[in-house]
Amino acid sequence: MRSPVSPALVARTSSFVFVGERLWLDFVNSDDATHARGEARTDALDSFEGFVGWLSAARLLDDERATALLRRALQQPTGSSAALHEARRLRNVLRALAERGDAPHERATQTAIAEINRILGRSAGTRRVEPRSDGGFVRNFVTAGDVFAGLMIPVIESAADGLVSGELVRVRKCADPKCARVFYDGSRNGKRRWCDMKTCGNRAKAARHRKKLSG
C-alpha cells in the first residue's frame, strides 16, 4: 500500500485559483483549477487526493487532518469515492445556483436549497478553531462517525450564507466567453466584469487594443 501524498505537495503542484470572493464560488470554480496561460484545464476534483488538496489550499484542512484523510481513503476507498462523487454533484448544483440563482423561485435555487438543507441536516459533529502550522488558524468541522461526511459542510454553509444575506444578485460569471468562473461582485458600482484582471481582464484589454490597431 503506497503512502499518502503530502497535502502540502498537492497544493504546491496544483494551480488552485481563488478569485470568487466567497468560498462556495471558489468551490464552483474548482472545475478549472489551473490559471497559467497555456496549461490544460485541470479539475481539482479529478481524484480524492485532488479534493483534499483543494480543501487544504482553501485553508479548510490543516496538513495533519488532510494527511489523515488521505490515509483513511486508502483504507476505505468506497467511502472516499462516495465523498468525491457527492462533492462533484454538489458542485454542479452550486454552479447552477451561481449562474441562475438570482430568482427565488428559479428551479436551480430550489434545488440548491433542498441540497443545502439535506447536507446541513446531517451535520452531526463539532465545530472548532485550531492553530495551523504556519501560525494561522483554521476552523474545522469534525464529524461524529463518518470521517468523510463533513468535508462539504464549510462550502455548504458558505452557500447558505449567500442565500440568507441576499448576495446572489451580486454573483457574476466572468465576461470572457472562454472562462466559466463565477465570482461575487463586491465593487461599489456593481459592474465588475472579470474574474481576475491579471488574466481574463488583461486578455480582453489586449484584444481590444489589437482590434483598434487593425481597424
Image (cartoon, rainbow, N blue to C red):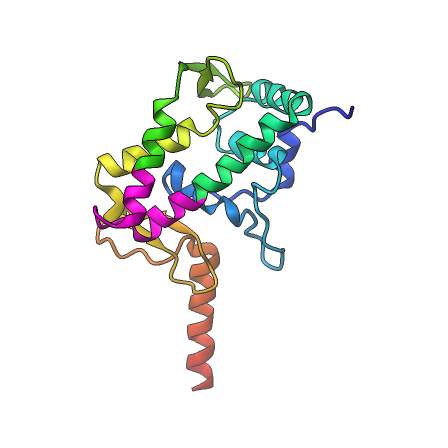
| Magenta segment, prevailing SS (helix, strand or loop) | helix
User: x, y percentage for residue 67?
Assistant: 63, 22
Residue range of the region highlighted in magenta in the rendering: 92-113
Number of numbered callouts drawn: 0
Quadrant where the N terminus is found in the figure: top right
Identified at 54% across, 46% down, the residue is 33
Asked if residue 206 lies left or right of residue 116, the reply is: right
Closer to the camera in the image, 65 or 195: 65
Find out whether residue 204 is within the magenta segment.
no
Instruction: Report which quarter residue 174 is drawn in.
Output: bottom left
User: x, y percentage for residue 112?
Assistant: 33, 40
Identified at 42% across, 56% down, the residue is 197
Quadrant where the C terminus is found in the figure: bottom left
Identified at 43% across, 67% down, the residue is 204
Instruction: Report which quarter residue 153 is drawn in.
Output: top left
Q: Residue furthest bottom?
A: 215
User: x, y percentage for residue 182?
Assistant: 39, 50
User: x, y percentage for residue 77?
Assistant: 65, 27
124 to 49, vertically: above or below: above
Q: Residue furthest right?
A: 1
103 to 208, vertically: above or below: above
Find out whether residue 104 is within the magenta segment.
yes
